[in-house]
Structure formats: C-alpha cells, structure tokens
Amino acid sequence: MLPQPGLEVDEVLFISALQHPDHTAYSRFWFHHREPLMLLSYVGALKSWLFAPLYAAGWLNVWSIRLPALVLAAVTILLLAWLAKELGGWSAAVVIVWLLATDAVFLLTAVFDWGPVVLQNLLLAAALLLFYRWSRTDRKWLLFWGTLVIGLALWDKALFVWNLSAMVVSLLLFGFSAARRRITMQNASLVILGLLLGTMPLILFNIRHKNETLAANTHLSLVDVPTKFHYLAASVNSETAPGAIADIGVPHAAPPARSRLQQASLGLAGVTKSVASDYRSWLFAFLFVAGMLVARGPARRWILFFFFSASFAWIQSALTIGAGESIHHSVLIWPLLYLGAALSASCLLRRSGRARIPVLVSGLTVFSVLGFLLVNRSAADLIRYSANTPWTDADVPLTDYLLSHGVKWVITTDWGIDRVIEARSRGGISVRDDSFSVRDGHFEDLMLLQCAAPECVIAGHVPARDVFPDQSQKLERFVSANGLETVPVTEIDDTHGTPTFRLFRLQPAN
C-alpha cells in the first residue's frame, strides 16, 4: 500500500521548500545559503530541515518520503506506550500499542503525511513523556528539552496551539496544586528559553509579517460545529478512512492483482465488506465513563487531563473556519485521546481480578481486528479503484511524458499539480501554479500565451477529475472570453485507465 498512491501536494510541500527556498513564506540567508524557515503562514520548515540530507544525496522518492514517515509513526506509538506504562502499567501500554497500530486514520495520515501531521503527533508524544519524567525526577534538562520540543511543534505547525492551550487549561483544572509547587524562577527561565529557541523561526516570521499567523488563521464560527462533530465521530470510527485516498466512485476496471498479497487483500475485503466501522467512539465513551467510576486519586486526574485536553483541542479546531472537516485535523488529538483510553482501560482491568487477561485479550482482539479490516479495506480500494485526484498515480506518467518531450516549463490550472511535478522531476521542470487565479476569475492571458513553445505546456485535470469545482469549465470560459482557444497536446491516464491530466497550449482563436 505504501508506494501505491501518487504523491500528494501537501505531502511534498517540504521538498518544494528545498528546491525553491525563495518561494516559501519566509527564508533567510545563512552562511551564503538561503534556508527555508516558514513554508506557509502556519507551517514551518522543520520537516524540510530533517529531510535535507536525503534531498542533497538525491535519494528523495516515494519510498524515502513515506518509509521514514512510517518509522516516525512507530516511534510515536512507542513513546506513547512508554508514557502509558509509566502512568498505568503494562496493561495501559499494551492497549495503546494495539489500538493505535490498527487505527486506520492514524496510519493513513502518518504514512502519507498530508496536512502534515506525523511530526505533530511525534513531538506531542515526546513532550508529554519529557514533562512527565521531569515531574518524577526534577531533572532540569528534561524540562528544557520538553519545552524546546513544544516550541519545535509550534514551528512545525502553528495549529499545535490547539493541543498546547488545551493541555495548559487542563493542567490548571486538574493539576494546578502540583504544578504550582514547581513554579520557580529557574524553571520559568528554562521554559521561556526552550520555547524561544523552538519557535524562533515562527517568531521572526510574525515580526516581519505583522502577526500574519494569527491574523490569517484564527477566524472563528459556530455554524459548522455540529457537522464537524459528526465528522469527528466518523474519523474516530475510521469510517472516513477507506474513502480518504481511493476514489470509490470512479467505475474504471482495476488492473489484475500483481501479487498474492494483493489477491489476499482483495479476498479479505470482499469477505468483510459489511464492516464499515471499528466502533471506537463507543469504546472511548465507555472507557471514559467507566474509568471515571473506578479510578481514584492521580489516575482519575490523568484520565480527566487527557480526555479534557483532547476535547478542548478539538473544540478549537471545530470553531476555526476551514479546519475540523478533515481527518488530518481530527488525528491531531489522537495521542491525548488514546492515552486517556489506555489509562481508563488499565483502571478497569485492575478491578477485573482473574478475568483481567481474558478481558484484555478479547477486547483488544475485537477492536484490533476491526481496525485491521478497515486498514485492509483502504489497501484493497487502492487496488480496485483509482486514487482520489490529489493522490493519483498518473503523476508518474505525467512527469515521464514531460521529461521525455523536453518540457522545461509548465503552467498548472488546477490545485495539486505544481509541487508534485517539481518533486517527481527532481526540480528539472519549472512550474507556476495559476489554479487560484483561474478559480477566482483572474485570467492572465499574456502569461499563458507565452506557453506556446515546445518546451512549455499547460497542465490541468480533465473535467471529471477537477479538484477545484468546475475548474475546467471556468478556464474554458476565460479562454473564450479572451479570444483564445485551447490546443490539446495529450491526456494522461492513471494505472486504472482513468483519464486524469490534460496537457494543452493556447493560441488566438481563428
């Protein structure tokens, strides 16, 4: 499943910053090199810095992009298991490992890392573990590293403020007396120093751009909260996972399974096609209520801390216009949600006596199997159906065609094409995106007319595969209104034979 979908534009955003650091939201000259600092007003260049050695060595491809993401997801699970063991014993660790490792939403968003989210979950898990170990040992360096990790998470994606603010409020509500005893000038200085170092690129960007991060990304509304809540429940149940990447509405015939593993995946998906949910929302609701009934002392406060933090963080995302309606927003609270569930489960298991092992095994078996079946459904759908347009594997033949025909310059007219071409061509093709201009009705005919030479071409999606609604029709109207006409070059199909990209040029209408 890992190499099957094509590269998605947000997934390769960090590569674009390495190829064109001067095209990012913010970059600086250091040691005679321009270094990217902010990719967007709310997304930092931390992932670009981490992957820079692979890029410099020429090793960036679908495997070197996604396999490290899978490893980071595995490390995240291990860190959360370590913390769960510290808080609730081995049973809590086993619960969180098995449930997260079979959570389709967690796995899909981590491995294919659109959003992006894999570093967000990793840094949250690391910060929680560091802070807990500091609270137990009072080692000052753990406090510093914990706040530095928090700062890096804010730089990586400013939306981390949802989790951070939620945890601060929860700490004040459920652990203020313990926290108050540790408020000293030395500790406060370490916290400030760690945060400043971690968030320095974000701070510099906002100083230069007049607080753009907050100004551009904090518009709130209550209108869509009920709809977003239903979407959250669907995400928790992994009901959104099978259709997240595969386009089950495209009726083209699938190519034959290429291996026995694919045949087995398709066979299992066919037998279990009635499984559409892993019902984890009911599990979490039960564990919260039951955990609160049986937990005592610190265990109860930790359960309240994690569940309230997850809830308050989600409420902030639901109130934010343009957020909360995608699984890459929902999954940001998964570490907090699963830690609360694991601690509740450990408290219940302690009260189960001799039935502890059978209850643990049976519960994990049911929910892990359901989760695995939905993960397999996602894999089988990618074999059976074309990928959704942003994930289309037609990006490979598209780039191959452009390179083999000597194309050096491409203008794109729909979202999600530009950075993928640059990544696949390793920067060998220059791309300018005009998708927003077309969508918003700003037609730059002179620029497009310059794309008449053989080394230039215009790339868009076929009408049925447009990402922006009716983008092809808008373009045709603009072309006609400006006395031009399109000259088709070719169409590019994906591996299922679904027409996906169209290449063309413009010329004055006859």
Image: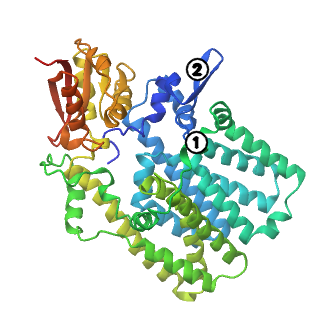
Q: Of 469 and 495, which appears nearest the observer? A: 469
Q: Quadrant of the C terminus?
A: top left
Question: Would you identify the image quadrant in which residue 281 lies?
Answer: bottom left
Badges 1 and 2: C-beta atoms under 8 Å apart?
Answer: no
Which amino acid type is shown beneath numbered disc 2? Answer: Arg
Tag 1 secondary structure: helix
The residue indicated by pointer 2 is 34
Residue at 19% of width from left, 52% of height from top?
384
The residue indicated by pointer 1 is 156
Q: Farthest residue in the top direction? A: 453
Give the mark nearest the N terminus, 1 or 2.
2
Tag 2 secondary structure: strand
Q: How is the image coloured?
A: rainbow
Determine which of the numbered discs, if any, sits on residue 128 in the image.
none
Residue at 52% of width from left, 28% of height from top?
24
Q: Is residue 32 visible?
A: yes
Q: Is residue 430 above or below residue 63?
A: above
Residue at 64% of width from left, 39% of height from top?
211
